[in-house]
């Protein structure tokens, strides 16, 4: 793999995808109830399907890329930009005003809000996702877990929440340690912690309950057995809402920090074929039993012993959906739209094929040298490598400020290769060729993770980044590289150029008295 | 004439040894010939150092030059010779916000004693809570940000009373 096969370019379009085109556009106009890269990505498919798109935006993002790309845009207001994007009533109103006939929620924000799905339906619009009851069922970890257990999907031993934190702690301690404490209504790692000793349990439960109350308005927490060296394996499913469901294979998202995924891949590394079949089969069983409608993801935890347990079901498009698209050649947004419009699956299980291996790296504004604290700045310069096997999912503009208003994820770099080793080589090369200057990012860290021997070997578990923290730490550059960096920087400065080019010799020499 | 730059917290000097026929500089004692100075400005560029082409991407803002070179990103600051001495150490009497965000809870009030490492204030940024701890043993002088208030990166959120005897 030579980086020479990558060329620089200013644009960042995804490669053309080849999917069978729908006979007729199932909707006339769709409002995208989101922003950033996912809004841009949804609008791309809407355009390909001949459907008009409506963007929404807070005043601070009036000139954002998703707004410019959409056929129409509606301003939404709120105390903060995030609050505006969480205001379901206002967004439904915007959809009605724009004359949309459906709403695509993207991921995050209102995508798993049963009240929003209901509100959209009651307004006479189509919610491109499951119905409100299914979202509510899967959105509560406890009801989801009970449903999974009742339908033969393996679940880990656990303790249900009570209003009494002390009683909860006592019951949880009886399972044994280590334990995982989670928010009942949560997601995305908020309100989660691992407890290894009985003495820490009460305090951990109190903190988790307080975080859960803050983020989800529901302070209930529960505890379950914690699997050591666990792998995060999830299955992409499609359901027709009438009990028909298929899977589009699994993804592995074991490389995480603070329960947030940073690198995802499809298929999972070194997964025994019978384990893959069992996990995918369990996911399809869950989706079919729930009469699930839409694209969804069933997440599992997989232990070193091959046992796997249901974690949760995400009733929406996943951040990491492009890796599945790259190995299957399917457009998941198109699949969502077709299912929402027709109630039929776009293809049969037997027609689903996987080819090669895909990796996604989440590029975030954060400082790997300072505990990955979020960073702010501006996108001063963006140079994106171009290749047919590469997608750079983003909504970035040069000159754009990177603020604390939204999530620190800036973009997703997704690569495909004939096999896992080829995909890793391409990922390392593409990250090296990616220049996003003006804000500190984790780009170099992501390359270090991909290039680590344990990652290459597929020796993954959710503690991967902690286990290899020392090897993944940024090393100072060698002196030759450092000198080149100093020269490249210095020769871009007007003061220095004048000094080396414009100033007559004697004047320059005067400077020597400093030394 | 030497140009001073900082990179990763260390100051380096680029000393101009010769200009003709090619620029020759000395950096930390090493001599380099720069045959091609490249174009100025932001974006992709290249210079020739010791006979080798060195491609890079560069951008500059507010005295910091961002350089992408050899697959890594670097931040270089130009030390303006007119600037006075480097900023003093400071910080020991203050708790700075490590990132922009909002205060979730304040655990200490002014006048209360704290020990090094003890949590004084809990903040939230990008949906993550972080405890900010006392940088040393001492007494809280002032809590400058209360629950719900927001702050920028590096803003002082809590001040400790100066240690008796300090000037």
Image (tube, grey):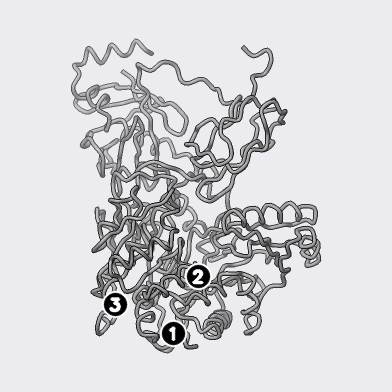
> Label 3, on which residue?
A27
Q: Secondary structure at mark 1?
A: strand
Residue A463: image x %, image y %? 61, 58
Foreground label between 1 and 2? 2
Could you tell whether A106 is left or right of A182 in the image?
Answer: left
Q: In front: A130, or A498?
A: A130
Do residues under tags 1 and 3 come within 8 Å of each other at their CB atoms? no
Q: What's the distance in space between the residues labelled 1 and 3, CA to CA?
A: 17 Å
Q: Nearer the viewer, mark 1 or mark 3?
A: 3
Say whether residue B67 is left or right of residue B107: left
Residue to which mark 2 is pinned: A114
Disc 2, SS:
helix
- Mark 1 Cα within 10 Å, few/some/many (few <14, many 20+)? many
Pointer 2 with pointer 3, Cβ within 8 A: no
A313 to the left or right of A207 = left
Q: First in sequence, mark 1 or 3: give its number.
A: 3
Q: Which residue is mark 1?
A: A240
Q: Chain of mark 2?
A: A
Same chain? Circles 1 and 2: yes
């Amino acid at each position: 793999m030579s980086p020479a096969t990558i060329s620089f370019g200013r644009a960042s379009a995804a490669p053309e995808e080849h999917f069978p085109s729908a006979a007729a556009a199932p909707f006339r106009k769709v409002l995208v109830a989101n922003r950033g890269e996912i809004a841009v990505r949804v609008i791309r498919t809407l355009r390909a399907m001949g459907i008009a798109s409506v963007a929404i935006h807070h005043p601070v993002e009036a000139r954002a890329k998703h707004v410019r790309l959409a056929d129409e845009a509606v301003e939404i207001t709120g105390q903060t930009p995030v609050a505006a994007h969480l205001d379901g009533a206002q967004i439904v109103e915007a959809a009605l005003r724009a004359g949309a006939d459906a709403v695509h929620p993207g991921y995050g924000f209102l995508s798993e809000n049963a009240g929003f799905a209901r509100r959209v339906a009651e307004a006479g619009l189509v919610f491109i996702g499951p119905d409100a009851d299914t979202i509510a069922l899967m959105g509560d970890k406890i009801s989801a877990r009970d449903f999974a257990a009742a339908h033969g999907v393996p679940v880990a031993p656990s303790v249900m929440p009570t209003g009494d934190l002390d009683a909860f702690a006592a019951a949880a301690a009886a399972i044994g340690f280590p334990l995982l404490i989670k928010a009942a209504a949560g997601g995305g790692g908020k309100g989660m912690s691992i407890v290894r000793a009985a003495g820490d349990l009460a305090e951990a439960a109190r903190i988790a309950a307080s975080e859960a109350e803050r983020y989800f308005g529901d302070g209930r927490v529960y505890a379950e057995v914690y699997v050591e060296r666990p792998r995060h394996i999830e299955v992409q499913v499609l359901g027709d809402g009438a009990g028909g469901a298929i899977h589009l294979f699994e993804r592995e998202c074991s490389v995480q920090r603070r329960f947030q995924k940073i690198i995802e891949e499809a298929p999972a590394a070194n997964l025994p074929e019978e384990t893959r079949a069992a996990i995918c089969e369990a996911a399809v069983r869950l989706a079919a039993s729930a009469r699930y409608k839409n694209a969804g993801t069933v997440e599992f935890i997989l232990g070193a012993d091959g046992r796997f347990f249901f974690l949760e079901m995400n009733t929406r498009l996943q951040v990491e959906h492009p890796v599945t698209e790259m190995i299957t050649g399917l457009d998941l947004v198109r699949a969502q739209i077709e299912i929402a419009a027709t109630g039929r699956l776009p293809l049969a299980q037997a027609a689903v094929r996987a080819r090669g291996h895909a990796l996604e790296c989440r590029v975030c504004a954060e400082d790997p040298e300072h505990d990955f604290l979020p960073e702010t700045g501006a996108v001063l310069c963006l140079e994106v490598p171009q290749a047919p096997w590469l997608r750079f999912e983003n909504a970035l503009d040069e000159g754009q400020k990177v603020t604390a208003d939204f999530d620190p994820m800036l973009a997703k770099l997704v690569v495909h290769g004939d096999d896992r080793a080829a995909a890793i080589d391409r990922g390392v090369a593409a990250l090296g060729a990616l220049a996003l200057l003006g804000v500190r990012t984790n780009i170099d860290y992501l390359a270090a993770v991909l290039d680590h021997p344990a990652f290459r070997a597929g020796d993954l578990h959710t503690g991967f980044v902690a286990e290899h923290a020392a090897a993944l730490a940024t090393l100072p550059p060698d002196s030759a590289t450092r000198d080149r960096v100093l020269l490249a920087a210095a020769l871009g400065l007007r003061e220095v150029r004048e000094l080396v080019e414009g100033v007559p010799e004697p004047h320059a020499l005067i400077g020597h008295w400093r030394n | 004439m030497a140009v001073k730059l900082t990179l990763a917290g260390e100051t380096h000097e680029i000393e101009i040894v010769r200009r003709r026929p090619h620029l020759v500089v000395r950096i930390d004692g090493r001599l380099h010939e720069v045959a091609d100075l490249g174009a100025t400005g932001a974006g992709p560029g290249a210079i020739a150092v010791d006979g080798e082409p060195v491609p890079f991407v560069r951008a500059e803002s507010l005295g910091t030059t961002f350089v992408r070179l050899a697959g890594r990103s670097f931040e270089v600051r130009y030390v303006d010779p007119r600037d006075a001495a480097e900023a003093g150490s400071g910080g020991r009497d203050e708790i700075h916000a490590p990132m922009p965000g909002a205060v979730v809870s304040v655990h200490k009030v002014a006048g209360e004693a704290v020990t090094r490492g003890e949590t004084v204030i809990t903040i939230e940024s990008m949906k993550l809570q972080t405890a900010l701890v006392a940088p040393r043993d001492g007494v809280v002088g002032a809590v400058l940000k209360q629950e719900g208030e927001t702050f920028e990166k590096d803003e002082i959120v809590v001040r400790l009373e100066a240690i008796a005897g300090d000037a």
